[in-house]
Image: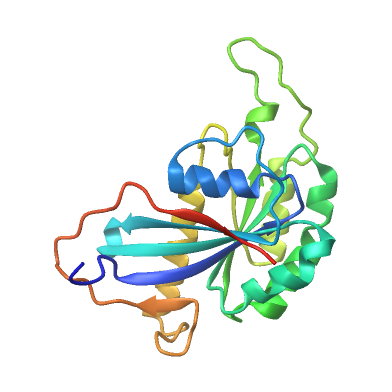
Amino acid sequence: MAGNNWHYVLKFIITGDASVGKSSLLVRLTDQRFLANPDPTLGVEFGSKLITIPEENKIVKLQCWDTAGTESFRSITRSYYRGAAGCLLVYDVTSRRSFDNLPTWLADVREHADPHLTCILVGNKVDLCEDTEGTAAKRDRQVTTDEGEMFAREHNLLFVEASAKSGQNVEHAFEQATRNILDKVRRGVFDDDRSPGVKLSKPATTDLALESAAGRGTCCT
């Protein structure tokens, strides 16, 4: 390849309790498929994706680190927070416990990631609470949309509810966070040279094509 075919590289982390669907959100973003029974994440998993932001005339490469949600891997996953420019803070709308644990995850992220980090709160698994073609919902919703919005407002977060299974709002969540990061870059909040989570690239051409798929791997200790 003669040169990079994106304008920025942004480091994202995906965090939250175990079993809230973090790995499924990443696979939905990168591979456009749903993991019905994903294996527990051991340490971290990695995925990348090119997205386009038309109003900015920019193509952005997202480098996403999906972190384990169990305490035994906390010391490992914290090291991957460092320098992150974006974060998906995920809970399961059918699990009150995953919502109640959000302050702990958020405190960890804000302690170790870039101080100007953009964080979007994602209420996942909304598909489990919806009636489909006359079929009753599979689970009761334990966290209302209003509660999610209130938590986001109180902690200065973006907010969206999503479904990794259906794909609802998954790309939108990453795009919304990316737009916010690019706005910070434009305003000089993020420094291209000193912010490890935001890297400026020089595209090889001005007419760039968006890649349809990206690689995915694992990383653990």
Check the image and report above or below for 148 versus 131. below
| Residue found farthest to the bottom | 194
Work out which residue is located at the far top of the displayed protein and give it.
134
**Is residue 62 visible in the rendered structure shown here?**
yes
Looking at the figure, which quarter contains the C terminus? Answer: bottom right
Left or right of 197, for residue 58: left
Q: Is residue 72 left or right of residue 113?
A: right
How many marks can you see? Answer: 0
The answer to whether residue 161 is left or right of residue 211 is right
> What is the quadrant of residue 87 in the picture?
bottom right
Q: Quadrant of residue 202?
A: bottom left
Instruction: Name the foreground residue: 20 vs 71.
Output: 71
Compare residues 163 and 42 and report the one nearer the observer. Answer: 42
Counting from the top left corner in percent of width and height, residue 109 is at 69, 71
Q: Is residue 185 left or right of residue 65?
A: left
For image coordinates 71% across by 73% down, the residue present is 78
63 or 151: nearer the viewer: 63
The x, y position of residue 69, in whole percent, is: 75, 56
Give the colour scheme shown: rainbow
Quarter of the N terminus within the rendering: bottom left
Vertical side of 218 occupied by 204: above or below: below
Give coordinates of residue 62: x percent, y percent: 44, 62
Residue name at image x 76 percent, y 53 percent:
17
* Residue 161 appears in the picture as rendered: no
